[in-house]
Image (tube, rainbow, N blue to C red):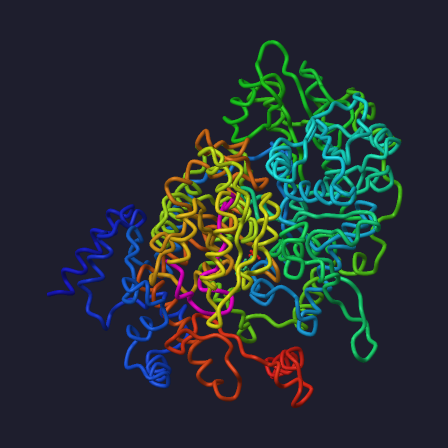
Amino acid sequence: MRLATGLRSLWRAKVNRRSIYTAAQTSPVDEYRKRMLPQFAYEPFASRHIGPRPDEVNNMLALLGYANMEPFIANVLPQDLPECSSGVEMKGLPVPLTESEMLATIRHYASMNKIKKSYIGLGYYGTITPAVIQRCILENPAWYTQYTPYQPEISQGRLESLLNFQTMISELTGMEVANASLLDEGTAAAEAMVMLFYHGGQKKPLFLVDRMIFPQTIACLQTRAEFFGIKIKLINREDDIDSDAFGVLFQYPDILGGINIYNCIQKAKSRGVGVVCAADLLALCMLKSPGSIGADVVVGSTQRFGVPMGYGGPHAAYFAARDEYRRKFPGRIVGISQDAAGRRALRLTLQTREQHIRRDKATSNICTAQALLANVAAMYAIYHGPLGLKKIASRVHQQAVLVANAAQKFGHDLINECFFDTVIIKPKTSITAAEMKKLAESYNVLLGSIGDEMVSISLDETVTDEDIKILLNILAMQPDLQSDVFAILEGTPSGAIGIPDEMKRNDNFMPQNVFNSYHSETEMMRYMNQLQSKDLSLVHSMIPLGSCTMKLNSATEMRTLSLPEFQDIHPFSPPANLGGYGLVMKELKEYLCAITGFEGVSLMPNSGAQGEYTGLLVMRAYHRASGQGSRNICLIPVSAHGTNPASATMAGLKVVPVKCNPMGGVELSDLEEKIKAHRDQLACIMITFPSTFGVFDEGMKRVAELVHTAGGLVYMDGANMNAQLGLCRPADFGVDVCHLNLHKTFCIPHGGGGPGAGPICVSAKLAPFLPTHPAIPHGSPKAIGPVSAAPFGSASILPISWAFIRMMGEDGLRKSSQIALLNANYMMKRLDGHYKILYQNPSKLCAHEFIIDCRPFKGTGNIDVLDIAKRLQVLHRV
Ligand SMILES: *Cc1c(COP(=O)(O)O)cnc(C)c1O
């Protein structure tokens, strides 16, 4: 009888298919589930995601002296959060879907995104990901689940791949040093500006920016410049270069497709002004390298080397410079060293420059970057080799020349005669630019625009003869133009437009073996597999880093990445065509609000550190709007992750450290003293909860009260949210802003050091200040400027986190945190007695991680932490 009712509900659900997708708290699916006999129930995803089986959970609890989960959790959590012991409600989370239901849902969402052929350009282009790279890297957990290669012994494969990336960048840009990726072109340009500023001793605060730069880059620079006290001045190419400036930025090719930056660079050099060039990699296969014409720093995106546009990201940005800047580089550099036996070995170099060590003296807060995407771009270059890349670049260029000739033939004005891949036209009088764009849309084509009068067309690797025909139809304003496009152009002069001889590249770039060896698919597959086999990832073992939660990146979650409707989308496409993205982002924000208790979310930050920076800017904007703009002190407990003080410094805040107590929490008396000393200047405290010492701070509520009473705000570093899901909500214990690392707690893979997504969640009073973006404005009038090049950051990986939450549901999420806490405490208990445990709460428990004290072994056996770490690596290998 009950089964029959169940089936009827299922039938109803089938008829009313959409109701599954909107999944209100009481959808027919939910009703059906409730009525189903338990023995026929679907396998919930949570039981696949969570490792320990029920009997193992009971055994672990028993070892810790607990009969069941609730009293254990109550003792782990701080005693001043009693309401949390049995778990908080996460209102607004939908009922969990099974894996196949989730896939059906996300496919339905995908169908609401309309793929259009994009010629918008502006740093984002169609590209073909070679299938062998897609399969062996992007879809391969041995590549995407890796952690940042801090331990060279188990990372030689990906270190070699990142070294290839650096070599490729050095070769194409003509620079001596390149790093192993940054977050995006806009922020890479900002890093270049800051690096030159520090290099010049911070004496001259003026930075010049060519007007021909991409608009999102200008916006990112302006956001970053403000709190460094840097003044940005937009200049024209013919302007004189102000010798008071410490640097100048040019785009190559620029927003009008133009490539004539040679004279400007020489002008800048003669005035002693540092030159940054934002350059397109494919163009550099044909154009003189920026290094060869005098640039000091070169930045840009590697997206069009095989990484789909993905509505804005993730893609790897690159950063390269002359050797003299080596010690001031942001991000990580892979270098060649020697192992104990004298053999060649790779490792991260200059690690002392990282924020972990330098803290508030760091000049950049880059931690997670875009390693996986850098690997894809490097492999793309390896697969095609220099000749293949030149061929692709030449084809794109030829198509651009053809389109430019056709445009003239059909009576439009060609604005730029020198170009690589981008043609700018002013339509003839019978049609406006807007009308031409509209006509294009009727062909499912997106053209770009420059002002109201000009149309821009950027060609790329994916453009076929058929696409060219369609473009010509649009330019001719005739739907049925004759099919032989080349005949149309007969007699049209060519060669006069395009790349002038003096700008053509004539050196042989990328001569290294690696770029000239793997051009068959078999060789390529073996090379990637050979590298992978040197590395350790989640396919081998656990990677026990507390806050850097290395959790399952489920195959089902990852399937969302393979949907072209999420991948082949230009970030500046009209949102009206992108209902699926709209829904995923809206729902994900709702879920994150339900989990944290907050009211507003920005998905723009591309990493945890970028989230910190964004949250701090939002707080500063709030203080300023309340007439408290001079508040500039940021309190940070000494236990904090190194990115916290680095981000605070970048936001123009002065860092004041706060001591910790023997239990790993904030030393309240020290906090009170520091607040007293800085009362009127106090902007905020940045606190990690549970702390990076591995305990829930017993005084958390009191900390928030003290800071609020002094007029400050509370920032919570939410990288440790894996310990809190469904147990407590930051908004309930006094936090005003937190970032979440979706690449830690919410299942986006680490990729060996990126991608990342670090959205911030804020209280209602801070929500109006969340960042907006010039291409897709989406904020209140009080919004701060963009912190990423793309409006919604790394949009294409957001469905992974959405899928995780959608399949886990409220109970599953809570259980995952309970088990994380149980696992850590079980391990601690087993090691207790053999090792000294540094921090525990009054119930002798830890949070999601714990620290053992290895210092005594130095005296007793001359063994230190590294020895233990290396022995663990050997054990992992067995
Ligand atoms: C990982 C982490 C960060 C930085 O996040 P990224 O995404 O690497 O920038 C900050 N704080 C804590 C506690 C972390 O674990």
Name the quadrant of the C terminus.
bottom right
Q: Is residue 343 above or below residue 606?
A: below
Residue, far top: 429
In the rendered image, is residue 104 in sight? no
* Residue 250, magenta (yes or no): no
- In the image, which residues are magenta? 681-701
Estimate the x, y position of residue 365 in percent, counting from the top left. Answer: 62, 52
Residue plotted at (59% across, 60% down): 751
Estimate the x, y position of residue 729 in percent, counting from the top left. Answer: 35, 56
Estimate the x, y position of residue 82 in percent, counting from the top left. Answer: 28, 65
Q: In this orientation, which residue lies closer to the viewer: 817 or 388?
A: 817
In the rendered image, is residue 199 in sight? yes
Q: In this orientation, which residue lies closer to the viewer: 650 or 247?
A: 650
Image quarter of residue 652: top right
Residue plotted at (57% across, 13% down): 431
Position of 41 with respect to 473 (left or right) is left
